[in-house]
Image (cartoon, grey):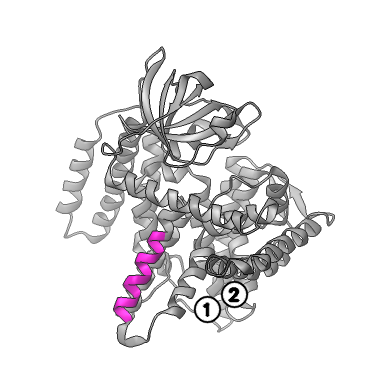
Amino acid sequence: MENKLLENAPLVKVVVSLMAGIIVGDMLPMMPLLPVFLCVLAVTLLMWRYENLQSVALCGCFLVLGALMMQRQKETLSVDWPEGEVCYEAVVLSEPVEKPKTMAVDILLTGNHRKLKCYLYKDERSRGLCIGDGLRIQSRIRENSDWRQGTFDYRRYLEVHGFTGSTFVPSWKWQKAEISLRNLSRLERTRLYFLKQRSQLLERFASHGLDGEPYAVVAAMTLGDKSALTQELKDVYAVTGASHVLALSGLHLGIIYMLLSLMVVGRRWRMISQILIILAIWAFVFLVGMSVSVMRSAVMLTTYALLTLGRREKMSLNTLAFTAMILLMVNPLSLFDVGFQMSFVAVASILLWVPLFGRRLWSLVAVSCAAQIGVAPLTAYYFGRFSTYFLLTNFIVIPAATVILWLALVVLIFPSLAYLLLYVAGLLNKVLAMIATIPGASISLHPTMLQTVMVYVIIFAVYLLMGKVVRAGGSSPSRRGW
């Protein structure tokens, strides 16, 4: 089965080599890898008569490419900030988040296009900042902190999200100002425009009567804004295994794709409708901030939509590997993002296990179990827990998320129906809070990295064994999804 798997998904070997190269590049000191890559590429091309050797050389080529991309990415994030205070102009990229003594905002320097974590002294001025506001600041910029807690590496988290430093600014050393955005790239200006639109949509939700925890859930599920989520609410969703519905992912984009597909006209305009749906999906990706999980889903949905036009195989491990390659080439540091890891592992697990389950399980149960098999070891490693009632939770949160997404669109058109959205989100929170109080709802686990890897080895071995058992039983699972 393993040979058949790799034959039907050749890009898996390539993307695994690329990932290995990124890890190697992160561990190695800075060195000139471009000549090495060109040499390996030349050897790969010269081996065209030897198929197996050329396949090995191609994997080596992508391994070196991964290391090269990683080192270049590290170079772009390396900045020697001045020792003292400097004056600079910046634009606000996020809504202010209240901390014990400061208001935290993300800012983009218009001079050198660097992103910073900015902590402003807490007062009415800092509370009133909005996305797109221009600032003139005088402060000292510091390198990213090396702070760690358990498996959480704060410096790596900042690097993955493009932050190159942080600064604390007293109230008398900053002011609002009209800042020119001409120095920003077209992509940066586009992202800023969509972030402003998201801020306006969130204000519309708030003005329609949504507030408190229901508003926080709606904002997270529909527009990817988690700033209003309280720690207590995050804990409830984490304990019950429902955190995935708060992070925009394939579930949410799949619902949106289905909604848009229902709205388009018949087959006569199939190509135009698919192009319009793709454009709408990517507009939504910009609107919610272009997180890794949403980008992964958008690339896969784009591939799916294009393949439907040619009536080709759609969702497969090859498609998933192709998506991973695109995202890693754009930002190699995405490999170290928890969202990237869990998103891809969950989808890969679904693609592998659901065909194996066949018709033995109801589809929702099969998908939930398959996804949990994939993400449970990572969840235990990063968050130290395993949710025992994940099946019960998914039977509740997936239909609820669908209703919330649909109602959110309706409320934007008919504000008088906001009470329905408030009721559904509030009811979901109450039900999950009840599940979280059930004894044994969450098991505390703290595996090491080696133990986590060994668990995945065991899971894959069980998968291969089950595949042989199913085939021996004469009911081979469908491979059309591979």
- Which badge, 2 or 1, is on the more N-terminal residue? 2
Observer-nearest of 479 and 115: 115
The C terminus is located in which quarter?
A: bottom left
> Image quadrant of residue 307?
bottom left
Instruction: Write the residue at 43% across / 77% down.
Output: 261
* Bounds of the magenta segment: 270-283
Residue 85 % position (x, y): 41, 14
Q: Is residue 67 above or below residue 356?
A: above
Answer left or right for 6 relative to 184. right
Q: CA distance from mark 2 to mark 1?
A: 7 Å
CB atoms of marks 2 and 1 within 8 Å: yes
Answer left or right for 36 relative to 416. left
Residue 214 visible in rendering: yes
Q: Which residue is mark 1?
A: 477
- The reply to whether the magenta stretch includes residue 126 is no
Assign a secondary structure to mark 2. helix
Q: Which residue is mark 2?
A: 357
Residue 458 visible in rendering: no
> Image quadrant of residue 441?
bottom right
